[in-house]
Image (cartoon, helix red, strand yellow):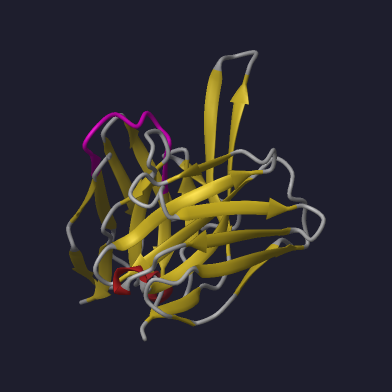
């Protein structure tokens, strides 16, 4: 299976700061990677698809980059509602897999 | 807009079959992959499998011998069956819509992500 390793496990930042989350794949996944945000008691919400495209309705402060095995989700200036858990997911190699998540918490 | 809603028993006995249904409302079944995922504290998010609108299926090898996903286009529903359940199958189960696209003229493939999710349903395996 393609293992997606997300780092850091926990990121402590303040509103207004910039957040950089990493996702590294154990094998090539081209750009077939998505990012999701999940808040407690809710389903995951699609943020980024195809590594760098924002999903419908996602604010411009969210951006994705990368290809191959190294990917990054950047949140330009944190809003209070951005504190949540973020997952990456690959859809190149079967079985499709998710990372273990990065928890973004308020400092 | 499109909405998904999971339904089914919240408690299943060990060795029995877990059965869940996802109802699609507000949109078409066509041109999508309809997926089941689950989330447990011990294993995080796990892709169970999908049924394509054409009827083709694909399952996670870790569950392949026990899982079946089917589609009922007349009811706009798709279903999950997981047999011989154990406590390890206790999780929140989510249905979701997934999409990709192959452009034959350019030879490029695009992945659009799982853009619509159900709210999730908790299934506990216990006697």
Above or below: residue B93 compared with residue A59: below
Count of marks overlaid on the render? 0
Q: Residue, x 29% and y 53% (percent of image)?
A: A99
Outermost residue toward the bottom?
Answer: B127
Residue B126 percent location from the top left of the image? 36, 83
Q: Residue, x 41% and y 80% (percent of image)?
A: B13
Q: In the displayed structure, does residue A77 sit left or right of residue A56?
A: left
Q: In the displayed structure, does residue A97 sit left or right of residue A59?
A: left
Quadrant of the image occupied by residue A17: bottom left
Above or below: residue B60 compared with residue B124: above
- Camera-side residue of B67 and B38: B67
Q: In the displayed structure, does residue B11 sit left or right of residue A76?
A: right
Residue B52 in view here: yes
Residue A60 in view here: no
Placement of the C terminus of chain B among the 4 image quadrants: bottom left
Above or below: residue B124 compared with residue B16: below
Q: Residue, x 42% and y 57% (percent of image)?
A: A36
Q: Residue, x 53% and y 57% (percent of image)?
A: A58
- Camera-side residue of A75 and A99: A99
The dominant secondary structure in magenta is loop
Q: In the displayed structure, does residue B74 sit left or right of residue B62?
A: right
Residue A91 percent location from the top left of the image? 42, 39
- Camera-side residue of B75 and A107: B75
Placement of the N terminus of chain B among the 4 image quadrants: bottom right
Residue A44 percent location from the top left of the image? 46, 64
Above or below: residue B105 compared with residue B77: above
Q: Is residue A1 magenta?
A: no
Quadrant of the image occupied by residue B100: top right
Residue A13 percent location from the top left of the image? 22, 69
Q: Is residue A26 magenta?
A: yes
Q: Which residues are magenta?
A: A24-34
């Amino acid at each position: 299976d393609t293992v997606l390793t997300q780092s850091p496990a926990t990121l402590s930042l303040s509103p207004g700061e910039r957040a950089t989350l990493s996702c590294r794949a154990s094998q090539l996944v081209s750009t077939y990677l998505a990012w999701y945000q999940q808040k407690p008691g809710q389903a995951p919400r699609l943020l980024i698809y195809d590594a760098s495209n924002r999903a419908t309705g996602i604010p411009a402060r969210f951006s994705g980059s990368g290809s191959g095995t190294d990917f990054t989700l950047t949140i330009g200036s944190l809003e209070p509602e951005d504190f949540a858990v973020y997952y990456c997911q690959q859809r190149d190699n079967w079985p499709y897999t998710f990372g273990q998540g990065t928890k973004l918490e308020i400092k | 807009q499109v909405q998904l809603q999971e339904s089914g028993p919240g408690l299943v006995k060990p060795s029995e079959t877990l059965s869940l249904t996802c109802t699609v409302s507000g949109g078409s079944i066509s041109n999508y992959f309809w997926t089941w995922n689950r989330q447990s504290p011990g294993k995080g998010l796990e892709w169970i499998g999908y049924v394509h609108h054409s009827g083709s299926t694909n399952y996670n090898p870790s569950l392949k011998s026990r899982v079946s996903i089917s589609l009922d286009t007349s009811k706009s529903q798709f279903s999950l069956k997981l047999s011989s359940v154990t406590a390890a199958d206790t999780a929140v189960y989510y249905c979701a819509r997934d999409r990709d696209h192959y452009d034959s003229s350019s030879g490029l493939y695009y992945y659009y992500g799982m853009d619509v999710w159900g709210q999730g349903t908790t299934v506990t395996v216990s006697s």
